[in-house]
Amino acid sequence: MIEGPVGTDAHSAWDVAIVGGGPSGISTALHLQAAAPRARIVVLEKAHYPRDKICAGGIGGRAFRILDKLGVEVDCP
């Protein structure tokens, strides 16, 4: 993971920029990677991870199944 400010020439380094590293952003990045393995993808997130907040206060059962299918482990308290 790259942290810190994005330089002015960074726009040429990526094919796709996804804003938000929550479940939707990560799911989008993983689906895109599966569909286009050579795509250069960056996920931009303002928060530091790991963190205590769960997006929207919780993740439903369907989302758990989708994330599991994508190989994403969710560690719930």
Image (cartoon, rainbow, N blue to C red):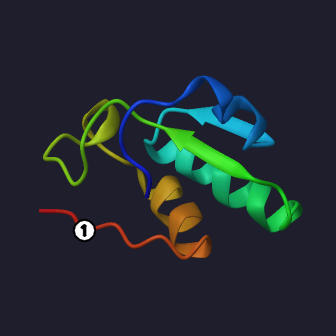
Q: Nearer the viewer, residue 43 or 53?
A: 43
| Above-or-below relation of 70 to 64 | below
Residue at (34, 30) in percent of width and height: 46
Q: Is residue 54 left or right of residue 39?
A: left
Considering depth in this image, is 12 or 74 the residue closer to the camera? 12
Q: In which image quadrant can residue 18 be found?
A: top right
Q: Position of residue 8 (x, y in %)?
A: 61, 23
Q: Is residue 36 left or right of residue 28?
A: right
Number of on-image labels: 1
Indicate whether 56 appears above or below 65: above
At label 1, counting other C-alpha atoms closer than 10 Å, the crowd grade (few under 14, some 14-19, many 20 or more) is: few
Location of residue 53 (image quadrant): top left
Question: Is residue 14 positioned above or below 11 on the image?
Answer: below
Q: Position of residue 44 (x, y in %)?
A: 50, 36
Instruction: Please report the residue visible at 54 percent of the width from the left and 50 percent of the height from the top.
Output: 26
Closest to the observer, 76 or 47: 47
- Quadrant where the image shows the C terminus: bottom left
For residue 35, which quarter of the picture? bottom right
Is residue 28 visible to the viewer in this orientation of the structure? Answer: no
Position in image of residue 76 (x %, y %): 20, 63
Which residue extends farthest top? 8
**Image position of 5 (left or right of 32):** left
SS for callout 1: loop
Res. 4 visible in picture = yes
Instruction: For the N terminus, give its image quadrant.
Output: bottom left
Q: Which residue is mark 1?
A: 75
- Tell me the residue at 83%/67% (across/down): 37
Q: Amino acid at mark 1?
A: Asp
